[in-house]
Image (cartoon, grey):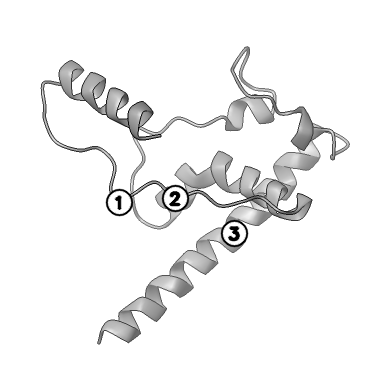
Amino acid sequence: MKRLFGGYTWYFNKKHNRSGSLFQGTFKAKHVDSNDYLLHLSAYVNLNYRAHQLGGLTAKLCKSSWDEFIDIGTGGFCNKNIILEQFRSSREYKQFAESSLKDIVERKNRDKEFYEILLE
């Protein structure tokens, strides 16, 4: 991951005539140990840019695989069968993911409030 992100940082900085790091903190990996976690992780990854927009941040530079999962985009690089085969249609997956988004934003706001209380 260090090599991948380091190479991308070099490319991005060169292209945009800038210097410095692009990513904050160290890379973290978490084992996906259940199907339920896999489905919610898929929703989180696909809709993370919207979670940040709803939280007041902008995500102008973000790109997502969301269009591939709901059949808007053509082509793409995602192997989405392991997720979509568990739903009757991409529309059903869309409903699942969007309901998960609400939970993600609520948890994010709850965590933010908790950290603010702790830091007081």
- The answer to which of 50 and 120 lies nearer the viewer is 120
Residue at left offset 47%, top offset 65%: 108
Circle 2 residues within 10 Å: few <14, some 14–19, many ≥20: few
Residue identifier under label 1: 25
Residue at left offset 28%, top offset 29%: 6
The amino acid at mark 2 is Lys
The amino acid at mark 3 is Lys
Query: In the visual, does 57 lie left or right of 96?
Result: left
Q: Position of residue 64 (x, y in %)?
A: 51, 32
Image quadrant holding the C terminus, namely bottom left
The amino acid at mark 1 is Gly
**108 lies above or below 98:** below
**Spatial CA span between label 2 and label 1:** 9 Å
Q: Of the numbered discs in the image, which one, if any, rests on residue 28?
A: 2
Q: Of the numbered discs in the image, which one, if any, rests on residue 107?
A: none
Image quadrant holding the N terminus, namely top left
- The answer to which of 106 and 36 lies nearer the viewer is 36
Do tag 2 and tag 1 residues touch (Cβ < 8 Å)?
A: yes
Q: Position of residue 65 (x, y in %)?
A: 56, 29
Q: Secondary structure at mark 3?
A: helix
Among numbered discs 3 and 1, the one appearing first in the sequence: 1
Q: Position of residue 114 (x, y in %)?
A: 41, 80
